[in-house]
């Protein structure tokens, strides 16, 4: 779908004989890709929710036979990408918890087998009802979107499928738990059909009773983004900062946005964490202090649901405060907030900001403004006043 210059999200649907495909082009983006049937028996017409100030066109993707060479992993990711049916309340409100990006990761084993895992990015999590709960997410993940692993397919060394699983709830959709996939696929395909069954966004391979008599409405994303080893899921957020913009729009509509996403300093930590929790503290020249997540939460895990080696956290800092800190200097420390103390290794730190533009954000890395020391009991960084550009000292730090 392509559209240039439209205000607001461009939404629409494609009605097929057995399902309805939802299409959403985020505000500020010029195009986004979905998977649609490449069949003469299916007429593909896009019906827009409202007429935008642009022309929109749907393109179908030609199917091709998979092979298992390194360069064709994305072809496998396309062929096994799930079709996600949205919750019933999302039938009526297509602008809540909007599925916005599908990424994939490849877990390789020494025996030649590998797993393909899909990660879904949504604009919010409806189970969170206050700005304090959203700020907790900023401390732990450096985002207020909801990011969930959705589906995983395992191959042996010869490319044969040995296992399929998805993320469901523990009981009646409560909690998070991995389940073997025993559901259905889209006709003549390897695309599993999964259903969003709870407001904290977990899934099922069985048709919920609430939609059994209805034509399912859902998303068939083209999985264009790979999250490689050792990157965190939030790495995709940094590569697609428009996700922050879309999340801000939803949270503002629902009264859950404390401050916009460009009012933060983002800290990307890489290392290992065995136990406990830590908090980033930024001490400004005027004597004031800023805590990650506005003090509403801690970072207690690295690389959740992927490699366990990298995470993002966010410290409230407005553009004006960043300007002043860049001129006057500041100090950042990582401190344990648990007993016993956090046990971790931090190998490197990187720093980012979001820059506001017309209907979107862009990303700016500001790591060169910091000088960090990671080889003592309390890792610290100095934001040099009027720094022309200082190289990061990537040292190894163990323990808090």
Image (tube, rainbow, N blue to C red):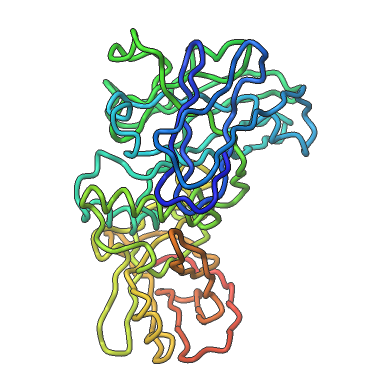
**Which quadrant holds the N terminus?**
top right
In this rendering, position of residue 90 left or right of residue 131: right
Q: Which one is in front, 86 or 343? A: 86
Q: Position of residue 33 (x, y in %)?
A: 58, 37
Q: Position of residue 26 (x, y in %)?
A: 46, 46
Q: Which one is in front, 137 or 299? A: 137
Q: Is residue 38 above or below residue 265?
A: above
Q: Which one is in front, 139 or 30? A: 30
Q: Quadrant of residue 342?
A: bottom left
Q: Residue at x 59, y 17 (%)?
A: 43
Q: Quadrant of residue 333?
A: bottom left
Residue that extends furthest to the top in the rendered view of this protein: 213
Residue 250 seen by the camera? yes
Q: Is residue 183 above or below residue 99?
A: above
In this rendering, position of residue 23 left or right of residue 81: left
Q: Which one is in front, 279 or 352? A: 352
Residue 169 seen by the camera? no
Q: Is residue 385 above or below residue 133?
A: below
Q: Position of residue 293 (x, y in %)?
A: 30, 62
Count of numbered labels shown in the rendering: 0
**Which quadrant holds the C terminus?**
bottom left
Q: Residue at x 43, y 26 (%)?
A: 178
Q: Position of residue 321 (x, y in %)?
A: 34, 80
In this rendering, position of residue 295 left or right of residue 363: left
């Amino acid at each position: 779908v392509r559209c240039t210059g439209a205000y607001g999200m461009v939404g629409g649907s494609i009605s097929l004989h057995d399902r309805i495909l939802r299409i959403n082009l985020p505000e500020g983006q010029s195009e986004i890709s979905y998977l649609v049937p490449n069949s003469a028996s299916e007429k593909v017409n896009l019906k827009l929710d409202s007429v935008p100030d642009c022309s929109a066109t749907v393109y179908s993707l030609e199917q091709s036979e998979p092979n298992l060479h390194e360069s064709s992993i994305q072809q496998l990711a396309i062929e096994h990408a799930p079709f996600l049916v949205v919750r019933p309340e999302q039938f009526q409100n297509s602008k809540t918890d909007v599925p916005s990006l599908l990424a994939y990761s490849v877990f390789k084993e020494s025996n030649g087998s590998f797993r393909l895992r899909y990660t879904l990015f949504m604009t919010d999590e409806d189970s969170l009802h206050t700005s304090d709960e959203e700020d907790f997410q900023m401390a732990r993940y450096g985002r207020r979107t909801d990011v969930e692993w959705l589906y995983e397919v395992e191959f042996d060394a010869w490319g044969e499928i040995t296992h399929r699983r998805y993320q469901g709830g523990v009981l009646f959709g409560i909690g998070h738990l991995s389940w073997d996939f025993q559901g259905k696929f889209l006709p003549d395909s390897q695309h599993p059909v999964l259903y969003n069954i709870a407001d904290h966004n977990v899934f099922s391979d069985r048709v919920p009773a609430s939609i059994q008599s209805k034509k399912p409405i859902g998303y068939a994303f083209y999985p264009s983004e790979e999250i490689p080893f050792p990157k965190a899921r939030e790495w995709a957020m940094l590569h697609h900062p428009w996700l922050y913009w879309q999340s801000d729009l939803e949270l503002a509509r629902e009264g859950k946005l404390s401050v916009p996403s460009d009012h933060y300093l983002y800290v990307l930590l890489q290392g290992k964490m065995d136990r406990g929790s830590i908090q980033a503290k930024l001490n400004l020249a005027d004597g004031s202090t800023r805590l990650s997540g506005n003090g509403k939460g801690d970072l207690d895990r690295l690389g959740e649901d992927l490699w366990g080696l990298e995470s993002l956290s966010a410290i409230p800092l407005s553009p004006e405060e960043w300007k002043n800190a860049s001129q006057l200097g500041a100090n950042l420390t990582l401190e344990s907030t648990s007993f016993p103390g956090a046990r971790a290794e931090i190998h490197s730190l990187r720093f980012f900001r979001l820059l506001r533009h017309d209907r979107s954000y862009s990303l700016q890395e500001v790591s060169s403004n910091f000088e960090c020391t990671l080889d003592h009991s309390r890792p610290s960084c100095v934001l040099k006043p009027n720094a022309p550009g200082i190289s990061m000292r990537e040292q190894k730090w163990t323990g808090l």
